[in-house]
Amino acid sequence: MAFIDYYKILEVDKKATEAEIKKAYRKMARKHHPDLNPNNKEAERKFKEINEANEVLSHVENRKKYDEYGENWQHAEQYEKAKQQGQYSRGGQQGGYEGGGFSGFGGGGDYSDFFESMFGGRQSGRQGGRSAQFKGQDFNAELHLDLKDVYTTHKRTLTINGKNIRITIPAGVENGQQIKISGMGGEGSSGGPKGDLYITFTVENHTNFKLDKHNLYSTVTLDLYTAISGGEVTADTFDGKAKLTVKPGTQNGTKVKLKGKGFPVYKKEGEFGDLYITYQIQIPINLSEKEKELFMELAKLRTS
């Protein structure tokens, strides 16, 4: 089996940081995504390679195993077990695996030869080889959504390694949150179970609301006259508009709370945070001479 250089696939150095790997993956995944390259088999193949490379290099433990064991990083535990049992030796040292005669990475075979001999691909002189079952490779995908997209529960179809997968995205999914879909990863070997699919959500906020946990925050501009005399204003909420009663003498920076008008709580049907609105009083400009006179009169009344 040919060695797969995941660093080369993502076009990063072996000393690349986690952030550099993530950035490279995002860039290349967008470029080769099947949705942007319909009926392009080469782009589809490249997209699969990119996801596979990211699965390995974006996880500290997986990357460590890959750096040591190459494409057979998922079988690292079996390799270590073989060493502990004296079934494997490096560089012709005493030991070696009985069934395959493999004596180390320099012994003429590649990693695949070693695992083939160890788990049933070859026959021992005294007994038949045994076959080990391995779970398939886990896949990782990143889904970019807008904050408006996750205000309500909805379904979406994703293309993962050339397969269309329809998933339900619950309301209130948070930025960076990851969900697992069992059995949607790679095929297992020797009858082993399929791997899983891990989807990480990147939620971007392009609204005028600030989100903090489940609460929303926004500002409403009040004209000076409404702030002084009181009245009504209309404010935007995330799913519509609401009328607010402004008390006479409202000060700049005054906050009001609209209970239950915030963001939905993940997997808690009907539960929402609150919406906090801050009043921002707008001072009138370009006053007429008459208006200036009236304000002067008011000032005199306040100081008399």
Image (cartoon, rainbow, N blue to C red):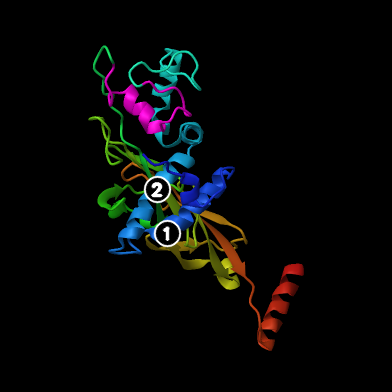
Q: Which kind of residue does numbered mark 2 sit on? A: Asn
According to the picture, the residue beneath numbered tag 1 turns out to be 30
Q: Earlier in the sequence, mark 1 or mark 2?
A: 1
Q: Is residue 132 left or right of residue 49?
A: left
Q: Residue at x 59, y 64 (%)?
A: 280
Image quadrant holding the N terminus, namely top left
Magenta region includes residue 164: no
Question: Measured from the top left, where is residue 138 in percent x and y?
Answer: 35, 38
Q: Which residues are magenta?
A: 101-124
Name the residue that disc number 2 marks.
51
Q: Distance between the Cα atoms at labels 1 and 2?
A: 11 Å
Q: Is residue 169 left or right of residue 5?
A: left
Q: From this view, report whether residue 189 is shown above or below residue 226.
A: above
**Element type at mark 1:** helix
Look at the image and tell me whether residue 147 can be seen.
no
Marker count (numbered): 2
